[in-house]
Amino acid sequence: MTYDEKYWTSRYKDKSTPWDVGHITTPLKEYFDQLTDKTLKILIPGCGNAYEAAYLHSQGFINVHLVDISEAPINEFKTNHPGFPSDHIIYGDFFELEDSYDLMIEQTFFCALHPSHRHAYAIKTNELLITGGKLVGLLFNDSLNNDRPPFGGFKEDYIKIFRPYFELTIIEESYNSIPPRQGRELFINLRKIESH
């Protein structure tokens, strides 16, 4: 199975999106609420319906960027949020991006990637972040599926993947997960280290 644009578009069109809870989740909302620099250049990869971007925009963040390989959620987001800067919405492949960001937000993109792509994700994330930039968000700490998304994993797996590229400032069980994910998520705050 190839988890390409066609696959994800069919999932959105069939409304087969159980990861989509319909709103920003508590850990990310509370993290965003303590950020004071509204000019941070933020990327949300695999953004889907991008509730995080809508929230950030509503709070006055002016430099939020989205990318998704499927045009279906991108078009939905544009329809629902006509005031969001259209040139900050990228219909394309995260792994082909060429830009730089202060902050990247992880919310159910990592678990959508086949585990064979996880090292590439860590490398690409490191490349896209400025010196000292951060990767912040949530990773499942649960076995989940091994034959289809969402793919699972555990803290020790993630430490091996990210340690060469990031200072693991925080990689701990999320204390404020939404009830269905309680005890099954890690909150991460990883700081880019320069590649060797």
Image: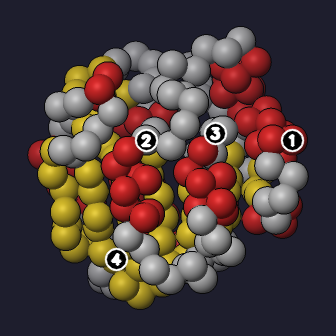
Quick one: label 3 or label 1, which is nearer the N terminus?
3
Disc 4: which residue:
192
Quick one: label 1 or label 4, which is nearer the N terminus?
1
Tell me, yes or no, whether the two marked residues, 1 and 2, touch with CB atoms within 8 Å.
Answer: no
- Judging depth in this view, the residue of 101 and 34 nearest the camera is 34
Local crowd size for mark 1, using a 10 Å CA cut-off: few (<14), some (14–19), many (≥20): few
**In front: mark 3 or mark 1?**
1
Disc 2: which residue:
25
Residue 63, percent from left and from top: 66, 74
Disc 1: which residue:
79
Residue 22, percent from left and from top: 57, 30
Q: Residue at x 68, y 74 (%)?
A: 62
25 relative to 195 in the view: left or right: right
> Picture quarter containing residue 49?
top right
Q: Residue at x 67, y 15 (%)?
A: 15
Tell me, yes or no, whether the two marked residues, 4 and 2, touch with CB atoms within 8 Å.
Answer: no
Find the distance from the CA under tag 3 to the CA under tag 1. 14 Å
58 relative to 1 in the view: left or right: right
Identify the disc placed on residue 48.
3
Position above or below: 180 against 87: above
- Judging depth in this view, the residue of 188 and 153 nearest the camera is 188
Q: Residue at x 29, y 64 (%)?
A: 189
Q: Is label 1 in a helix, a strand or a loop? A: helix
**In front: mark 1 or mark 4?**
1
Find the distance from the CA under tag 1 to the CA under tag 2. 22 Å
Find the distance from the CA under tag 2 to the CA under tag 3. 14 Å
Q: Quarter of the image for the N terminus: give it.
A: top right
Amino acid type, residue under disc 2 in the picture: Thr
Amino acid type, residue under disc 4 in the picture: Lys
Quick one: label 1 or label 2, which is nearer the N terminus?
2
19 relative to 88 in the view: left or right: left
Quick one: label 4 or label 2, which is nearer the N terminus?
2
